[in-house]
Every structure is written in structure tokens, then in C-alpha cells.
């Protein structure tokens, strides 16, 4: 049985005074030789023994230390649970028996606790009115804690922030969200509650490093599992289009872990700035091409750029120099032997997900996956896919059309049916068997779910006649062959997962 204690009640306190959280416990204790301590722990555990978090039940006797006794020879105090042992003159049978058997002296000990001992939850419970819940959950973004306080908590926001700062040594800044997310640039207004006014966050997610100004961009640490889930669906070397990339939570691991080539876009100039910085920070400049434009326009432009030779040469120019293989005696002998063997030409390989070997005829490329992580409005952008592969039926088979991963919100009881219906309404076609998964990402509010629908783009949408059939994207690619190394651009010819 553990003792239950709480700090002094300070209901209604709005300015933190740490001295108000001092508390003394008058305990019954047994003074015993040091050799007896182990037996005391065994025989008195689970009831008479004091069991409090972050406190030792057996301590050195302060009176003997004050008298100058040898620390090794000094006796110990076994502290007893005040809820079980209330008086030194009325010991429970188990304690009385142990004391007599071991020749223990029954005494009293004053245990002083201060602000540093109490947890954030205990301090806040002693401050907030009983009808208010303690805001225990918060999102950590590097050294920043982001709260989303309810209206009832606002009068106590400063003291809440200070207590959380005191009790979480890894935090230096506490902020509170003061407005809804801006649906254009995806950041929210916030106020500083406690700590440094420093919004530059640095953190690691998976094997990737991120740096950004949290007050100017969108980041949600609770989505790490979702980031991992999406990236796990990619095969090494695939072509990825990240339409609402933010600072790169999908783009960077796709490039760094899967060696995918990623065209990543965000409309927010600040997000684009830190996306570029994070690309450099993770040394994937040759794999990630950042954009700063409208998502619908990007869907069209990225496909055009994917088939522009100069774009590939730009990525190729940023590739790090290949590592020199270690030279061994056996390798040297093999090289010498090969010089005497007849030389045979290697057949040109089919590159990526297009047709035609490099150097012989143009290659048409298209993205294997599109990520659309803008839950509030991403579905509305799906109309950009209508006719975006017009005239390419002879190059792109139906089973290799892109997979689209579109995040969205739903308040409907049957969220899956709701999401599918909304997608079909925008693209103007039935999804049918093209739906691979409608994944429940997380609950964001009462009766509001965040989901991700993953579906293969229907052929009748991809190859439809576009409104502007004369647009650049519907022209055949340049006859200039695209030269890029197999390591950077090759995609297997097996179907997309």
C-alpha cells in the first residue's frame, strides 16, 4: 500500500509562489542497524513501509550524523507509512513484531517536502478549481511545448505555463494556441506563456533532422506514426510528388531512407524556406526538388518538370561524389585478369517507370505516389488530376497509374463512405476497386476524425480530355534524351504497391 499525499491547496492562485508548496509529514520511524535494512524492506513492504515516488524509505539517521558518527557505522531510519502507522505508541502487529525481533528503536521523523518534489499534475490540481481538468497533454516540438488551452483555463494560463516549464527540464519555451490553423499557409497564432521567446525548433524524427520556426510553419509531432506509415509504402527509387510538403516530414525520409526522388511543394514561403534548409541539412539535394507554388498548379507543373531533361541534370549535378571502393589484393588481380578478356557492351537499360532506353528515344516519366497532406482542403485539389495524363494511354498502363494518399477530415458516423463519396464527387468518377485503404489517422476533436484515403487514380480520370487540351503538360516530351544515373532515377518495372 502506497501513501497518498498531495501539496497544500492553493486554489485560485494565478501567480506562482513556490514557497506555498512546502509541506511537512510527521512520520513514525524505526531506528535500526544498517545490517537490518534489507530485512525491513522485505518484511514491511506493501503496507507499513513508506512508499512514495522519488523518495527513499530508508535513510541515514540525521541525528547520529549531526553527532559526528561514522557514516558506515551510523544507524538507519526506516520510514513508515503515515496512513498505516499513526502513532509510535500503537504500532501495527507486523511493525511491533519486527521492532522487537530486531531491537529497533521507535522514533519520529519530520519529512519536509517542497515545490521541487511535486509533479506538474499535483501542483496544478492544487491550484485549479475542482471542476477544471488539469491540461496534462501537450505537444513537444524540440524545446517548445505547444498547449491548446480551453477557455476555462485562460485565467490560469501563465501559472500553467510556468509549472510545465519547471517540471519538464527538456523544455525551454511554453506556448498556447490562440487561433485556428490558417488554411492557406497552415500555421496558427500563438502566445508565449513561459520561458524563452525562441520559436526556432530543432528536432529529429526517424533518421532525419528538422529545423524550422514553429511560429511560421505547420508541424505536428503526433503525426510521426503517419509519416512512417506513408513512407513505408514506397519502394526504393520510386518517384514521389508531395503536394503539401510543409518542412519535409514525408519528403525527407522518403529520400533519405528509400532513395526516392521527391518533388516537394508548399505554398507557405516560410515552409518552403525551411524545406530547402532541411534538404541541405539531410544531404538529399540530389533527391528532393523543393517548390513554392499553389498545389493545383504544382500537380501539373511537377509532371512537366519530371519530363524536362534540364531538371534531371540539375539533380544529377547535386549528387555527392561516389565513395571510392576499398582496393584489395583480390580486386586488383580481378581487374588485371579482366583486361585480358574480350569486352562486351552492356545493353541499355529501361529507365524508371517510362519506356525507352536512355540515349535511344525519349522517356516519359510519371510519379508513383502523390502525398496530399492538407486535411482541411486536400480533396478539393483532386480535380487537378483530371486529364493530366491525356494522350498517354500508350505509355502508362492502368495498373501503373499513380497511388494518391489524400488526408482529410470527416464528422460522419461512416467516415469511410463519406470520404470516398467526396473524392468521387471531385474527380467525377467512381473509385470502385481502386481504393486501397481508408486509414483512420487520429481523432482531432469530438466527432471529428482525420483520415487518409489511398487509391489508385482511375484511368477515366487520368486520361480524360482536359479542359485545356493544348496546355504544355499534354505535349509530348522533348526529343532530348534524359541522362541520369541508375542509382538516382531507376524504378523497378514491377507494379506499384
Image (spheres, rainbow, N blue to C red):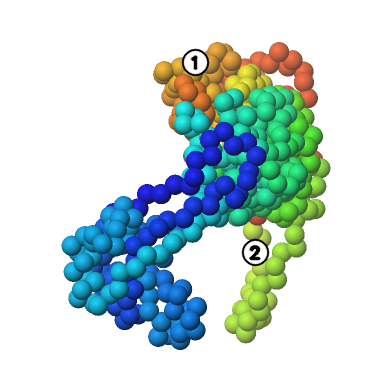
> Which residue does the image show at 66% across and 60% down from the upper left?
345
Nearer-N-terminus badge (2/1): 2
Note whether residue 171 is visible. yes
Q: Is residue 41 left or right of residue 443?
A: left
**Quick one: SS at disc 2?**
loop
> Which residue does the image show at 46% across and 31% down from the upper left?
130
**Quick one: SS at disc 1?**
helix
Note whether residue 229 is visible. no
Pick the front one: 293 or 404: 293
Q: For residue 28, which quarter of the picture?
A: bottom left
Measured along the vertical axis of the image, is residue 313 above or below residue 93?
Answer: above
Pick the front one: 275 or 111: 111
> Which residue does the image show at 33% across and 58% down from the upper left?
81
Measured along the vertical axis of the image, is residue 296 above or below residue 1?
Answer: above
Task: Residue 387: give x, y in percent of width and height.
Answer: 65, 20
> In which quadrant is the N terminus drawn?
bottom left
Pick the front one: 232 or 476: 232
Task: Residue 328: give x, y in percent of width and height.
Answer: 63, 81
Cα distance, mark 2 to mark 1?
57 Å
- Residue at the outermost front position: 89
> Which residue does the image show at 71% across and 30% down from the upper left?
189
Residue 344 tag number: 2
Measured along the vertical axis of the image, is residue 460 above or below residue 130?
Answer: above
Q: Nearer the viewer, mark 2 or mark 1?
A: 1
Task: Residue 449: give x, y in percent of width and height.
Answer: 49, 26
Q: Which residue is mark 1?
A: 421
Task: Residue 201: give x, y in percent of width and height.
Answer: 70, 47
Label 1 CA crowd tier, 10 Å (few <14, some 14–19, many 20+): some
Residue 314 tag number: none
Measured along the vertical axis of the image, is residue 341 above or below residue 425?
Answer: below
Amino acid at each position: 500500500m502506497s501513501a497518498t499525499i498531495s501539496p497544500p491547496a492553493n486554489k485560485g492562485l494565478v501567480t506562482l509562489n513556490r514557497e506555498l508548496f512546502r509541506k511537512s509529514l510527521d512520520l513514525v520511524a524505526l531506528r535500526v542497524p544498517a545490517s537490518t535494512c534489507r530485512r525491513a524492506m522485505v518484511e514491511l513492504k506493501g503496507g507499513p513501509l513508506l512508499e512514495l515516488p522519488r523518495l527513499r524509505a530508508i535513510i541515514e539517521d540525521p541525528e547520529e550524523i549531526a553527532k559526528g558518527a561514522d557514516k558506515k557505522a551510523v544507524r538507519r531510519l526506516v520510514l513508515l507509512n503515515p496512513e498505516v502507522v499513526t502513532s509510535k505508541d500503537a504500532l501495527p502487529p507486523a511493525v511491533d513484531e519486527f521492532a522487537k525481533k530486531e531491537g529497533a528503536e521507535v522514533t519520529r521523523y519530520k519529512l519536509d517536502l517542497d515545490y521541487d518534489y511535486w509533479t506538474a499534475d499535483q501542483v496544478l490540481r492544487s491550484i485549479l478549481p475542482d471542476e477544471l481538468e488539469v491540461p496534462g497533454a501537450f505537444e513537444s516540438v524540440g524545446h517548445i511545448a505547444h498547449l491548446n488551452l480551453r477557455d476555462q483555463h485562460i485565467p490560469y494560463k501563465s501559472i500553467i505555463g510556468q509549472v510545465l516549464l519547471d517540471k519538464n527540464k527538456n523544455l525551454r519555451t511554453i506556448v498556447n494556441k490562440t487561433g485556428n490553423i490558417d488554411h492557406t499557409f497552415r500555421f496558427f497564432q500563438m502566445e508565449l506563456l513561459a520561458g524563452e521567446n525562441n520559436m526556432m525548433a530543432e528536432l529529429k524524427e526517424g533518421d532525419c533532422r528538422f529545423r524550422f520556426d514553429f511560429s511560421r510553419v505547420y508541424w505536428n509531432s503526433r503525426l510521426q506514426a503517419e509519416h512512417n506509415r506513408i513512407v513505408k509504402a514506397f519502394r526504393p527509387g520510386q518517384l514521389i510528388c508531395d503536394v503539401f510538403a510543409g518542412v519535409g516530414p514525408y519528403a525527407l525520409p522518403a529520400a533519405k531512407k528509400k532513395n526516392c526522388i521527391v518533388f516537394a511543394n508548399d505554398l507557405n514561403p516560410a515552409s518552403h524556406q525551411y524545406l530547402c534548409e532541411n534538404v541541405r541539412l539531410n544531404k538529399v539535394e540530389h533527391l528532393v526538388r523543393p517548390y513554392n507554388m499553389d498545389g493545383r498548379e504544382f500537380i501539373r507543373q511537377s509532371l512537366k518538370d519530371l519530363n524536362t531533361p534540364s531538371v534531371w541534370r540539375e539533380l544529377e549535378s547535386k549528387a555527392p561524389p561516389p565513395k571510392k571502393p576499398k582496393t584489395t589484393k583480390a580486386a586488383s588481380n580481378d581487374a588485371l585478369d579482366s583486361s585480358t578478356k574480350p569486352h562486351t557492351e552492356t545493353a541499355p537499360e529501361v529507365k524508371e517507370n517510362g519506356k525507352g532506353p536512355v540515349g535511344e528515344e525519349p522517356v516519359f516519366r510519371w510519379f508513383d505516389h502523390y502525398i496530399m497532406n492538407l486535411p482541411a482542403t486536400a480533396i478539393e485539389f483532386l480535380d487537378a488530376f483530371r486529364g493530366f495524363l491525356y494522350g498517354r494511354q500508350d505509355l502508362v498502363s492502368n495498373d501503373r497509374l499513380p497511388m494518391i494518399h489524400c488526408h482529410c477530415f470527416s464528422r460522419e458516423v461512416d467516415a469511410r463512405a463519406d470520404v470516398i463519396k467526396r473524392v468521387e464527387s471531385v474527380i467525377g468518377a467512381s473509385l470502385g476497386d481502386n481504393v486501397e485503404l481508408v486509414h483512420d489517422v487520429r481523432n482531432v476533436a469530438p466527432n471529428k476524425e482525420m483520415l487518409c484515403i489511398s487509391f489508385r487514380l482511375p484511368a477515366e480520370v487520368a486520361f480524360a480530355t482536359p479542359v485545356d487540351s493544348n496546355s504544355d503538360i499534354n505535349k509530348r516530351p522533348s526529343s532530348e534524351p534524359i541522362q541520369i544515373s541508375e542509382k538516382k532515377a531507376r524504378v523497378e518495372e514491377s507494379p506499384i504497391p
